[in-house]
Amino acid sequence: MGSTLIHGATVLSVDAEDRSFEGGFVAVRDGRISAVGPRADRPDPSGFDEVLDLTGHLVMPGLVNAHTHSAMVLFRGRSEGQSLLTMDGWYNSIREPELSLVAADIGPAVALSCAEMALSGTTTFCDQYFFAAEIAAAVKQAGLRAVIAYGIVQLGDEARGADELARATDFLEQQRSADGRIIPWFGPHAPYVDNTEALLKAEVEVAKTHGAGLHLHMAAGPEDNEETLRRYGRTAAVALEAAGFFSGRVHAAHCLELSSEDIAVFARAPAASVAYSASAGLRSGREGICPAVDLRAARVTVAIGTDNVAANNSYDMVAEMRVAGLVASHREGRAQPLSSRDLIRMATIDGAKALGLDHEIGSLEPGKAADIAAFDFRGPGYSETPDPETLLIYSGSGRDLRHLWVAGEQLVRDRVLMRRPYANIRSAYSATYAGFWERVADARQSKEKEVA
Ligand SMILES: [Zn+2]
């Protein structure tokens, strides 16, 4: 695969000591980081196939988007004025048109999402949706790394639940890619709302057997806790713990309303984490805000995710870090309880931990996969500061991403996608988008006729 020496940049290692190097270097050999360090230790450039002087750039681990639904780019701007964190809002703006989705829509939609993520610094994401095999195929083509959680929705139908579990198990067995970039998981959509306890227990067992995790929505809307409080007198987190759900790896999105008892459930679980999706939470108008500061104080891993782009409209993780930081200040009633360094960790190494990938990605350290993002700090907004993390988060943008590597393969070079031209991805997407919404309109029309 060859070797690359990146030097001259501000390098954020995001290692355990949070070391950064002004004018530092990163050396990559055969897809892995071979060395990272200060200018003084830079190896001889003649020993590398490629040498990149990135003076005026920030070089850091690729961003980890810890919660999204990449196919839902088809719904971008289609749920304005609706809360997607309530059953009603979700049903009216998403679920009804979603019934017109076909497998062929997924590839072009996921390809566009992957392009947007790569072009704004994301190298890994955690996805949950139907059509998991089609998602995996599109991610493979894009070259990104992704946890893909097979969305299991039972909706009170026992036979459907059993059938979905069998399909999801096939997915776990077939999709784990040899290069490690595709990591199949399960994704019970929202426990108790659409999965029975018996099904959840079966999911936990199968996931454990296959070394997979479970990605779900939790305490996102009032329906979640209401249902379990009514049935068991317990919140969703406490009820799920009692059912054995927290005995394996669990990654829960949103968590807007967690009690101190709920936080304790996460803290004592062996591998539980939260995807803090601040933009989607704020946009929903719900009063609750994910208690990211309390969770971190209880040593729970808190990662950052954009959620789907109908609830956010952007995959820009730099913007998402900014919102996550601002919302935490507002919630805690003090200035920046999450520092810029904290936010960078949450969007890199903590995302990697949440997905069980921190041995492989999330920081720039020798031996890890070379998943690297380089942001161009030479343009407007990036003036001198002692704090490059703050410069990126509060003055910068994901659109200043210039180069991106996954496992040492350069996927973005000079803001251009290397595997497939963006224009090509975009035109395939536009055709799919038009066809999909035409089918939705047809379905609505025939329904109206039926009623009449
Ligand atoms: Zn979601």
Image: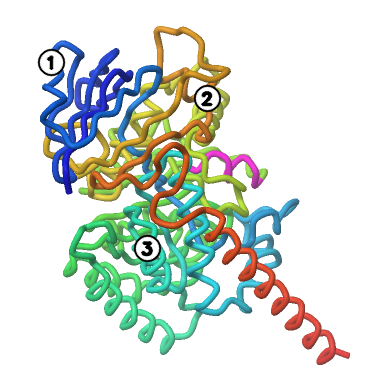
Q: Which mark sits nearer the N-terminus, 1 or 3? A: 1
Q: Identity of the amino acid at label 2?
A: Gly
Q: Is mark 3 on a helix, strand or loop?
A: helix
| Circle 1 or circle 2, nearest the eye | 1
Q: Is 212 displayed left or right of 144 in the figure?
A: left
**Residue found at x 71% / y 76%:** 440
Q: How crowded is mark 2: few (under 14 residues within 10 Å), some or many (20 or more)?
A: many
Residue 106 horizontal/vertical position (percent): 50, 70
Residue 437 horizontal/vertical position (percent): 70, 72
Q: What element carries label 1?
A: helix
| Residue matched to label 3 | 141
| Cβ atoms at labels 2 and 3 below 8 Å apart | no
- Work out how far the residue at label 2 is from the one at label 3, CA to CA, in angstroms: 29 Å
Q: Which region shows up in magenta?
A: 277-284
Q: Which mark sits nearer the N-terminus, 2 or 3? A: 3
Image vertical order of residue 374 relative to residue 122, above or below: above
Protein image colouring: rainbow
| Residue matched to label 1 | 41
Q: Is 87 displayed left or right of 191 in the figure?
A: right
Q: Identity of the amino acid at label 3?
A: Gln
**Residue found at x 31% / y 83%:** 166
**Front-most of residues 359 and 268:** 359
Q: Identity of the amino acid at label 1?
A: Asp
**Residue found at x 39% / y 58%:** 142
Q: Is residue 281 magenta?
A: yes
Q: Is mark 2 on a helix, strand or loop?
A: loop
Q: How crowded is mark 1: few (under 14 residues within 10 Å), some or many (20 or more)?
A: few
| Residue matched to label 2 | 396
Residue 295 horizontal/vertical position (percent): 37, 35
